[in-house]
Image (cartoon, helix red, strand yellow):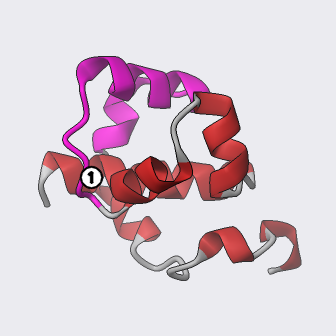
Amino acid sequence: MTSMELIGLNTKWYRYQKGFTQEKYSNITNFKMAYISVIETGCANLTCKNIDLIAKSFGIKVQALFDEDTANFAKKLPPRIDMYNKKAM
């Protein structure tokens, strides 16, 4: 997996764990929803500043965004996790 894919999948995972929709997460980070989608699909070439912001928004260390085990869990999430309420699952 590339660094961009790892960060994207881990961002998706932590967003899901917090119960944030892409819209809510965009309000927290001030990223556009479309940009969040690009990040989560592993297509965003993020700056260090944005990586720090993502980690801070989830209350995690930057290193957690590069965890391959967590990224593998994220691969098993439904493609449109923002449509589902974690508590309903």
Which residue corresponds to the image point at 33% horizontal and 64% vertical from the top-left?
41
Return the residue found at the far left: 2
Q: Secondary structure at mark 1?
A: helix
Look at the image and say whether residue 46 sits in the magenta stretch. Answer: yes
Tell me: residue 68, above or below residue 29: below
Majority SS type along the magenta span: helix
- Which residue is label 1 attached to? 6
How many numbered tags mark residues here? 1
Asked if one can make out residue 60 in the rendered structure from this viewpoint, the answer is yes
Tell me: residue 50, above or below residue 73: above
Which residue corresponds to the image point at 86% horizontal and 69% vertical from the top-left?
87
Q: Is 57 or 32 nearer to us in this picture?
A: 32
Image quarter of residue 30 = top right
Location of residue 40 in the rendering, given as x and y in whole percent from the top left corner: 39, 58
Location of residue 29 in the rendering, given as x and y in whole percent from the top left corner: 58, 30
Asked if one can make out residue 70 in the rendered structure from this viewpoint, the answer is no
Q: Which residues are magenta?
A: 42-66
Locate the N terminus by quadrant: bottom left
Q: What amino acid type is highlighted by mark number 1?
A: Leu
